[in-house]
Image (cartoon, helix red, strand yellow):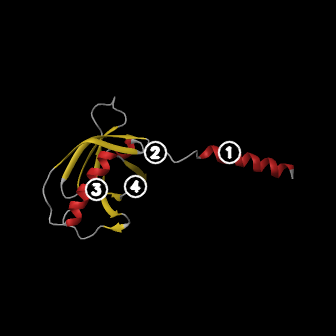
Amino acid sequence: MKKLIALSVISLVLSGCVNPGKASVQPDRLKSHRFVLENVDGKAVKGMTTQPEIAFNALPDISLIDNISVSGQMCNRFTGQGKLSEGELKVKTLAMTRKLCTELQLNELDQAISDMLRKGAQVDLTEDQLTLATADKTLMFKRAE
């Protein structure tokens, strides 16, 4: 009986040390990867003339550890230099072309990605699935290399 109690206590202590919380995504896990949009707020994205995507690249200045280059396309192309810190991606200087697309959903995605990146979005990367989320919107992407 004493062995069982001792074993239970040791197991409990060790399990508390294994996973203290969800680890945030590090910039090196995103760099040099491209992802295509699969769904928006749980609804599949299909039948668009342009495949919405986002890509991440390394910046030449190694001293900028948490900085990452972000580019992609919804309807319009966008690019910027962002910072990934504690699982949140912010791109304060986001440049975007300004054409009007015939597909309403692509125009809405332009606005959504712009708002998300400028204000900050939580980033989650599991295997080949990237999720960008705010309180209002969730975009799920699949790795496409």
Which mark lies nearer to you, 1 or 2?
A: 2
The numbered mark, 2 or 4, whose residue comes first in the sequence reads 2
Q: CA distance from mark 2 to mark 4?
A: 18 Å
Q: Return the disc, 1 or 2, that comes first in the chain's sequence.
A: 1
Look at the numbered discs 4 and 1 and tell me whether their residues touch, using CB distance below 8 Å: no
Amino acid type, mark 4: Ala
Disc 2 and disc 4 in contact, CB within 8 angstroms: no
Q: Are marks 2 and 3 in contact (CB under 8 Å)?
A: no
Residue 14: image tag: 1
Binning the other alpha carbons within 10 Å of mark 4 as few (below 14), some (14 to 19) or many (20 upward) gives: few
Tag 4 residue: 135
Q: Nearer the viewer, mark 4 or mark 1?
A: 4
> Mark 2 is on which residue type?
Ser
In this rendering, which labeled residue sits more in front, label 1 or label 3?
A: 3
Q: Residue type at mark 3? A: Ala
| Spatial separation of the CA atoms under disc 4 and disc 1 | 35 Å
The secondary structure type at the circle numbered 4 is loop
Q: CA distance from mark 1 to mark 3?
A: 43 Å
Residue 37 locus on image (x, y percent): 30, 60
- Residue under label 2: 24
Q: Which residue occupies 25% across, 59% down?
A: 109
Mark 3 and mark 4 lie on one chain; the one further toward the N terminus is 3
**Residue identifier under label 3:** 112
Q: Residue at x 22, y 62 (%)?
A: 106
